[in-house]
Amino acid sequence: MYLVLFGPPGAGKGTQAKRLEAACHLVQLSTGDMLRAEVASGSALGIKAKDIMEAGKLVPDELIVDMISSRIDDAEGEAGFILDGFPRTIPQARALDAMLDGKGLKLDRVIELRVDDEAMVERITGRFSCASCGANYHQKFNPTKVAGLCDACGGDRFDRRADDTMETVRARLKAYHDQTAPLISYFEKKGNLLSVDGMAAIDDVTRQIREALD
Ligand code: AP5
C-alpha cells in the first residue's frame, strides 16, 4: 500500500504515520526527519536546509526530490510506504508521479488531516520528543505516563525542535497555505483524496484512518 499523509504543520502526520507503520508494516518516509538528520550530520544538504527550515520556509524542490527518490528506491520490496511531509508543492507531486510511474506503482490514497490553524500553534509549541529514542509527546495532548520519563525507553532527556517557535509556526502555516494547500485539488482530480477530521483525539484520528483504509 502506498500512502501520503497530508496536512499543515502540527496536523498529526508524524503521529499517525508511526501508528500506521507499526500496524500495517509500512515504511514511514518523512522528509522533515530526513532533513533534520542531514542538519545534525552537517552534510552539504543539511547546511543548505538549516536556515530555510528555521525560517519556516520550504526547502527547494530539486533538493527534496533528489533526497526522497533514493529513499523510495530503498523501500522497494517492502509492503509499501507512507509519505509524511512529501509532496508539498505541485512540482514535487509531479515528480512523485513520475517516480512511481517509472516503477509501475501508483498511490493508493492521500489522507488529508483537516485541522484549524489556531489549534496547530498550540500543538506545535507543546511538542517535545525523547532525546534517546525520538518518541514524540505533547505536554497537554500526549504527555508521558510518568512525568519526566519516556514511555518507550525510560530516557529522561527531552528535546524540542528548533523550528517549533511561535514565529516559525506562523511562517510554516503561511508556506502551507501558499504552496502546499493547492495540492488538495490536484489530488481531488486524481480521485485518491480521503479527508479525515484531524481535530479529533489522536486515537479517534487513527480509527478514522484505519476504517477508511479497510
Ligand atoms: P516537517 O518535519 O514535515 O514538519 P511539518 O509539516 O511542519 O509537520 P510537523 O512535524 O510539525 O507536524 P505533524 O503533522 O507531523 O504533527 P505531529 O504528529 O508531530 O517539516 C519541517 C520543515 O522541513 C519544513 O518546515 C520545511 O522547511 C522542511 N521540509 C520538510 N519536508 C519538505 C518538503 N517536502 N518540501 C520542502 N521543505 C520540506 O503532531 C504535532 C503535536 O501535536 C505532537 O506533539 C502530537 O503529540 C500532537 N498531536 C498529534 N495529533 C493530535 C491530535 N489529534 N490531538 C491533539 N494533539 C495531537
Image (cartoon, grey):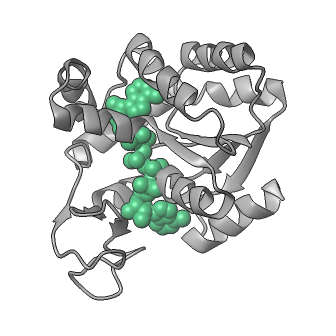
Estimate the x, y position of residue 166 in percent, counting from the top left: 25, 48
- Residues 174 and 106: in front is 106
Q: Residue at x 65, y 71 (%)?
A: 204
Asked if residue 114 can be seen in this view, the reply is yes
- Residues 102 and 123: in front is 102
Q: Residue at x 65, y 45 (%)?
A: 112
Q: Kindly give the residue lying farthest to the bottom in the view shown.
A: 146
Q: Quadrant of the C terminus?
A: bottom right
* In this rendering, position of residue 127 left or right of residue 156: right
Please give the count of numbered marks on the rendered protein. 0
Image quadrant assignment for residue 37: top left
Q: Quadrant of the N terminus?
A: top right
* In this rendering, position of residue 32 left or right of residue 37: right
Estimate the x, y position of residue 30 in percent, counting from the top left: 46, 40
In the figure, 88 relative to 20: above or below? above
Estimate the x, y position of residue 55 in percent, counting from the top left: 23, 30
- Residues 63 and 143: in front is 63
Image quadrant assignment for residue 211: bottom right
Asked if residue 5 can be seen in this view, the reply is no
Q: Kindly give the residue lying farthest to the front in the view shown.
A: 77
Q: Residue at x 74, y 32 (%)?
A: 107
Q: Residue at x 47, y 32 (%)?
A: 176
In the figure, 206 relative to 116: above or below? below
* In this rendering, position of residue 186 left or right of residue 198: right
